[in-house]
Image (cartoon, coloured by chain):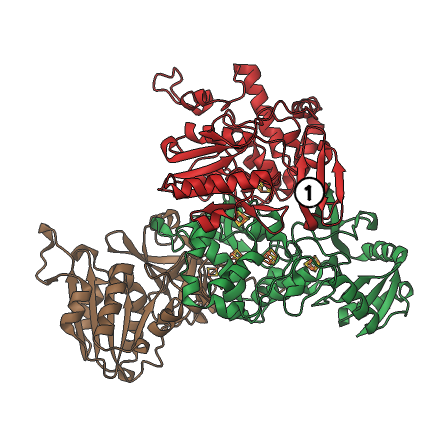
């Protein structure tokens, strides 16, 4: 019998980090060493994480292939399954299948300047690409990272934001928060990501942009980028829908002739514009 | 064009023209003249497509209970459908001031599945239902069938052929219909069987259930916006999978949920694609409720609107704390 | 490949003899007028003159509920095991042309050779020999003949195809699997008919079709933005009950859900049919729903059948079996939708 495509494999959680408010990052290692070695995810791809008896969810892998001894997932507690995952500790078991879905076109991006634009937990999918780019630094040009969250406490990946990434050559980081609390001690910018993007005003020439975040942010970022003169092929983003099978068969994530789980989550704006979507959505 | 069709069209056009309503809900011809489909007529042009004949079987009021309609509308109802109107009013699913109920007395509806071996249903032109029988006129011939041979079982002992609520009645009132059958006897004889026999009977049926939920979605009693069967991801006792035990759990639960709210319209049984006699179960519970608590037929007159069924009612002064 | 004949009484002998070695799945009358494909124990149970079963043959290859694997789990221990694979050999007897065609379409979804080929579906496909049965009397709602490459006698992907003649069946042997079955049981078959006999018979049967619809250009028409955004879908959706009759009994619908049964520290993950007509099908966390009302859901079904499926797999997603229009509680009729949409464009 051929391989059961819906069967996940046992894995062990080797580290749990509090990432930000309601978000934790889990370091996960597949129990089968061979399988772990051959996992080979591309930046932007996802995996299905499951807790037996509870369910399964498609989660973006936030660690790059270049760090192949483990997989990392940053997960917000938003439902039954993710609530249970948040209870897990180092040494606990989880099940996993993948890699699934499309990846960022990192080959097409070689030699280009890059702008990463993210909001909240939307930095998680981009992080795999950002670290992949930094692990192959000479292949890519200048990197701008524009990132915002609801408040300083809501920023993810703080160590990378404030220490690792700024120390890398030819990188500019632009951080912003929607608002602050008194105890936040924030002397950075306050405001929304799309506005910051307009202020940074990157030149479309030789640049590719990658955006991920809450739908409303994506909407305004896409508008801003088009106003700045970026062509649709230079604008890359991810789509998110309710998913089950993750392999383009169960029909749940169908939009037009695409299955978001299989053909996505990564799309460029040309592809998105071809999808039949009600204007108001 | 039949006389009833003419009356229905004229009434609809009049209401639309006078601006009394924005929408008239009736039937139009479906795949064949003998197969009808609901029509939402909001223009005079569409009103010209309205029809009325013994194939107008759907209960239309249920289609209005979704809260989708903001404008004033009119709906055509048969006797059984009119009880659904009361039922929906009891649950605040309809706004009495926003709906004009147009009642049409009914002699019984023809069940295409029953007659399809006797006549070519694709060629039926006209059907006449009387107390004595059913005349089916096709392109080639006229077939005379008995009521038992041609009508839905539910029509064979219909007690409410005339609308129990209506702002206007179109057509002549029907005097009492013949009792061709007593459904309650069938229910009683099933109830009198041994536990093992009953089990066998229901298992054979429930095993086939597809869990398509057509019975629930067509039901006059089911008005919950957020039904527990849609929430089974959160429930641990009823799985979405189709197994005999989950199918049984579904049916038993639903039977209890419609207890005291079922108006015996038979829609659940009619819409079931795999022929499960769902209504037998619901009827049994209605009869038990009558025996135990003296709750007779519900939703039989306008008085019942403000007098909802006991099991569908919650009073803060109820002695039972739990409920 | 070759054309043969089998007598009517020999057919049930053949089925009974096949039953010894293989599992036979065939149309049976579960209840008056309720025809379903089931495992049969004797050829007497098999109904030959039925118009169409209520549930399609997809239920055999893609069961309504299918167990995917079993697990044992504690917080720090986890074991996941495939369930024992089936090792039987099966004969699916009596599939009508529309259902045969639907299996061709489901093959495109489940059985591709890609990385994610559906092992459950593929296993049953590989182990099943399909004996198709032409329709002698198309039903009132059948419109297969309106679709490309389909007719009440089309062989599609059957291994063997039977067409009722006067007193016997014309037998078309179409694949190696079919050839094997026929040569293993050669005493039941005789040489009598030719391809021309089949053509004559087909013409006769087709002339009895009641329902037709013109599907020309429907994909291109459905691709128009005006059609996608038309008020028509809203209007159509008013009468829809949002049940799953149309999709569960559709031979080409393949949507499913994945759920767990678990008791204590062990359980099973299974999948079961699901439907784009249910309101919670696409509902995501936080009550966000890309298809929030019946308008989007009704549109999705027809768009998927008549456009998206074709765009992705190169064939229309409807095989004209007529089940959905017959069984839909409100007779929401795909043939009517097709002609209405053509008017819109
Ligand atoms: S309509 Fe019939 S098949 Fe569908 S859920 Fe109800 S009883 Fe089951
Ligand atoms: S069967 Fe009919 S009523 Fe039910 S969901 Fe389908 S179209 Fe709607
Ligand atoms: S859409 Fe309807 S007619 Fe077409 S294949 Fe499905 S059930 Fe049959
Ligand atoms: S999306 Fe709807 S119409 Fe298409 S296969 Fe799935 S259930 Fe059927
Ligand atoms: S649609 Fe065609 S193939 Fe299918 S049952 Fe009807 S006549 Fe036969
Ligand atoms: S999640 Fe099943 S098709 Fe995409």
The chain under label 1 reads B
Res A45 seen here: yes
Residue displayed at 45% across by 44% down: B233
On the rendered structure, is C168 left or right of A33? Answer: right
Q: C56 or C77, which lies in front? A: C56
Measuring from the top left, give residue C146's x and y in whole percent: 64, 65
Q: B318 or A156, which lies in front? A: B318
The brown-coloured chain is labelled A
> Where, quadrant-wise, is the C terminus of chain A in this rendering?
bottom left
Q: Colour of chain C?
A: green
* Mark 1 surroundings within 10 Å by alpha-carbon count, few (fewer than 14), some (14 through 19), many (20 or more): few
> Where, quadrant-wise, is the N terminus of chain A in this rendering?
bottom right
The red-coloured chain is labelled B
Residue B302 quadrant: top left
Rendered position, B270 above or below B311: below
Q: Which residue is denoted by mark 1 in the rendering?
A: B113
Rendered position, A155 above or below B111: below
Measuring from the top left, give residue B240's x and y in whole percent: 52, 45
On the rendered structure, is C60 left or right of C80? Answer: right
On the rendered structure, is C303 left or right of A156? Answer: right
Residue displayed at 61% across by 59% down: C120
Rendered position, A268 above or below B3: below
Residue displayed at 40% across by 43% down: B17
Measuring from the top left, give residue C332's x and y in whole percent: 55, 51
């Amino acid at each position: 019998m051929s391989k059961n495509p819906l069967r996940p494999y046992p894995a062990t959680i080797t580290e749990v980090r509090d990432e930000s408010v309601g978000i934790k990052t889990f370091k996960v290692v597949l129990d089968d060493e061979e399988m772990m070695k051959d996992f080979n995810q591309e930046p932007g791809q996802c995996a299905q994480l499951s807790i037996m008896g509870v369910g399964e969810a498609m989660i973006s892998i936030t660690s790059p292939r270049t760090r192949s001894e483990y997989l990392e997932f940053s997960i917000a507690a938003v439902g039954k399954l993710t609530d249970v995952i948040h209870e897990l500790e180092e040494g606990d078991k989880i099940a996993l299948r993948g890699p699934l879905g499309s990846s960022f076109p990192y080959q097409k991006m070689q030699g280009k300047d890059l702008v990463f634009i993210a909001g909240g937990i939307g930095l998680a999918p981009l992080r795999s690409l950002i670290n992949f780019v930094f692990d192959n630094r000479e292949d890519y040009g200048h990197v701008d990272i524009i990132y915002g969250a609801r408040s300083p406490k809501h920023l993810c990946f703080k160590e990378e934001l404030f220490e690792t990434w700024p120390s890398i050559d030819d990188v500019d980081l632009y951080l912003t928060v929607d608002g602050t609390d008194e105890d936040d001690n924030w002397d950075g910018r306050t405001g929304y990501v799309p506005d910051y993007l307009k202020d940074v005003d990157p030149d479309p020439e030789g640049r590719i942009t990658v955006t991920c975040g809450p739908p409303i942010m994506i909407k305004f970022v896409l508008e801003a980028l088009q106003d700045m003169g970026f062509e649709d092929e230079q604008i890359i983003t991810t789509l998110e829908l309710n998913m089950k099978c993750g392999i383009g068969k169960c029909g749940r994530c169908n939009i037009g002739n695409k299955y978001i789980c299989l053909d996505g989550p990564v799309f460029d704006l040309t592809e998105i514009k071809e999808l039949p979507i009600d204007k108001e959505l | 064009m039949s006389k009833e069709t003419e009356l229905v069209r004229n009434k609809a056009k009049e209401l639309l023209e006078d601006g009394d309503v924005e929408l008239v809900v009736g039937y139009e011809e479906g795949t064949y003249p003998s197969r009808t489909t609901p029509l939402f007529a909001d223009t005079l042009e569409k009103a010209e497509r309205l029809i009325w004949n013994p194939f107008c079987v759907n209960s239309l009021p249920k289609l209005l209970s979704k809260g989708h309609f903001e404008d004033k509308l009119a709906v055509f109802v048969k006797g059984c459908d009119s009880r659904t109107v009361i039922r929906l009013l009891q649950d605040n699913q309809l706004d009495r001031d926003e709906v004009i109920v147009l009642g049409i007395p009914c002699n019984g509806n023809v069940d295409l599945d029953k007659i399809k071996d006797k006549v070519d249903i694709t060629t039926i032109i006209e059907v006449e239902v009387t107390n004595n029988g059913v005349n089916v006129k096709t392109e080639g011939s006229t077939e005379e069938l008995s009521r038992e041979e041609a009508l839905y079982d539910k029509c064979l002992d219909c007690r409410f052929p005339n609308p129990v609520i209506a702002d206007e009645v179109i057509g002549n009132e029907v005097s009492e219909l013949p009792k061709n059958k007593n459904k309650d006897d069938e229910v009683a004889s099933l109830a009198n069987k041994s536990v093992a026999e009953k089990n066998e009977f229901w298992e054979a049926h429930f095993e086939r259930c597809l869990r398509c939920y057509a019975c629930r979605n067509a039901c006059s009693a089911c008005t919950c916006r957020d039904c527990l069967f849609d929430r089974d991801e959160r429930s641990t006792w009823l799985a979405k999978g189709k197994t005999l035990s989950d199918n049984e759990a579904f049916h038993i639960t639903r039977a209890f949920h419609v207890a005291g709210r079922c108006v015996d319209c038979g829609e659940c049984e009619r819409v079931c694609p795999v022929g499960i006699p769902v209504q037998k179960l619901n009827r049994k519970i209605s009869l038990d409720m009558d025996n135990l608590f003296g709750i007779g037929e519900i939703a039989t007159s306008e008085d019942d609107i403000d007098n909802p069924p006991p099991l569908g009612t919650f009073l803060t002064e109820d002695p039972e704390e739990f409920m | 490949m070759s054309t043969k004949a089998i007598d009517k009484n020999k057919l049930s002998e053949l089925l009974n003899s096949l039953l010894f070695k293989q599992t036979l799945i065939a149309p049976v009358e579960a209840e008056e007028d309720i025809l379903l494909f089931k495992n049969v124990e004797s050829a007497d149970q098999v109904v030959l003159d039925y118009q169409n079963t209520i549930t399609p043959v997809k239920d055999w290859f893609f069961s309504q509920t299918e167990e995917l694997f079993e697990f044992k789990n504690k917080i720090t221990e986890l074991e996941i095991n495939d369930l024992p694979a089936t090792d039987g050999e099966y004969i699916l007897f009596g599939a009508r042309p529309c259902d045969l065609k639907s299996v061709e379409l489901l093959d495109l979804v489940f059985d591709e050779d890609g990385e994610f080929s559906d092992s459950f579906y593929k296993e049953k496909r590989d182990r099943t020999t399909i004996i198709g049965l032409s329709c002698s009397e198309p039903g009132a709602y059948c419109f297969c003949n309106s679709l490309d490459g389909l007719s009440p006698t089309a062989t599609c992907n059957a291994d063997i195809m039977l067409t009722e003649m006067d007193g016997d069946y014309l037998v078309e042997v179409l694949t190696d699997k079919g050839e094997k079955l026929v040569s293993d049981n050669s005493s039941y078959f005789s040489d009598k008919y030719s391809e021309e006999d089949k053509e004559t018979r087909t013409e006769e049967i087709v002339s009895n079709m009641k329902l037709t619809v013109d599907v020309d250009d429907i994909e291109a028409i459905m691709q128009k933005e005006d059609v996608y955004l038309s008020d028509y879908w809203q209007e159509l959706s008013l009468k829809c009950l949002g049940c799953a009759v149309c999709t569960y009994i559709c031979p080409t619908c393949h949507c499913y859900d994945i759920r767990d049964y678990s008791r204590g520290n062990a359980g099973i993950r299974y999948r079961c049919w699901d439907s784009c007509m249910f309101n919670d099908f696409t509902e995501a966390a936080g009550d966000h729903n890309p298809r929030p009302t019946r308008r989007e859901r009704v549109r999705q079904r027809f768009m998927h059948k008549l456009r998206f499926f074709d765009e992705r797999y190169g064939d229309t997603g409807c095989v004209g079996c007529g089940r959905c229009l017959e069984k839909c509680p409100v007779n929401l009729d795909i043939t009517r939708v097709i002609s209405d949409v053509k008017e819109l464009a």
